[in-house]
Image: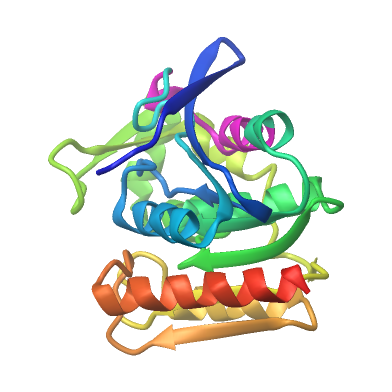
Amino acid sequence: MAFGQIEALEHLGVQIAFERVEGAAPTFVWLGGFKSDMAGTKAQTLAEWAREHGQAFVRFDYSGHGVSGGRFEDGTISRWLSDTLAVLDQRTCGPLVLVGSSMGGWLALLAARARPERVKGLLLIAPAADFTEKLIWPSFSAKQQRQLLACGRLELPSQYAPEPNVITRDLIEDGRKHLIMGAPISFDGPCYILQGQADPDVPPGHVLALNDLIRSDNKRIDLIKDGDHRLSRPADLARLVERASMIANQLAR
């Protein structure tokens, strides 16, 4: 994948890698998924769109992800939210549009709540809000739950990588501090959601329930009939860029 200059921000003793594309406000910020990184197809597509259209854009890797420092197993929602806010506060200025994929959708909503004066738009792709509690924990058998609590970690096969996914007790327990699907979610700006109806990881019903909770007068959800979790096919990427352009045009008025 083609990158511009990779920079680093030291945060809590770890180097957080990021790339900036200079351009017009608002700044679009890519928030990746669980064990994903900023070299992915969707992030790269948005970076190319930003360069071609003179749009400010930032992508970064959470601690323990991609080319950032730290261990993945040390990560929690609190830590990755802190990484996100550090990048927003120290490496961006002006209005923001957060583009969150999967876990990044949850973090985008949390960051919007933490920085309401700056986050003016949301573009969420298969947003996995509360996934530690609503999607991961109930998927475990009683035996797996006991093992996780006793040993502090559980290794699960991944369909996206040869190495297993490591789920830690800290991840599950920390996630309970950040649950957002128990009450309405206030947001004043445009909030667009892309969701595949064939997503095996984040069920469409979960995302529809989240969409119902978001209190925005300017929201829309695209349910993509044959779309999977990644939504990285050419047609999916074209839709992503189209929705990003729509938000940029609205906020530029």
Residue 249 vs residue 35: left or right?
right
Compared to residue 34, the image places residue 190 above or below, namely: below
Which residue is more in the foreground, 164 or 61? 61
Residue 50 place in picture, x, y as percent? 49, 56
Residue 114 vs residue 13: left or right?
right
Residue 120 place in picture, x, y as percent? 76, 61
The magenta stretch is 70-85
Q: Quadrant of the N terminus?
A: top left
Q: Quadrant of the C terminus?
A: bottom right
**Residue at left 87%, top 52%?**
117
Magenta residue check for 246: no
**Residue at left 44%, top 86%?**
223
Magenta residue check for 71: yes
Which residue is more in the foreground, 227 or 77? 227
The reply to whether residue 199 is in sight is: yes
The reply to whether residue 105 is in sight is: no
Give the main secondary structure of the magenta stretch. helix
Q: How many marks?
A: 0
Question: Could you say which quadrant of the image residue 239 lies in?
Answer: bottom left
Compared to residue 202, the image places residue 77 above or below, namely: above
Question: Could you say which quadrant of the image residue 214 lies in?
Answer: bottom right
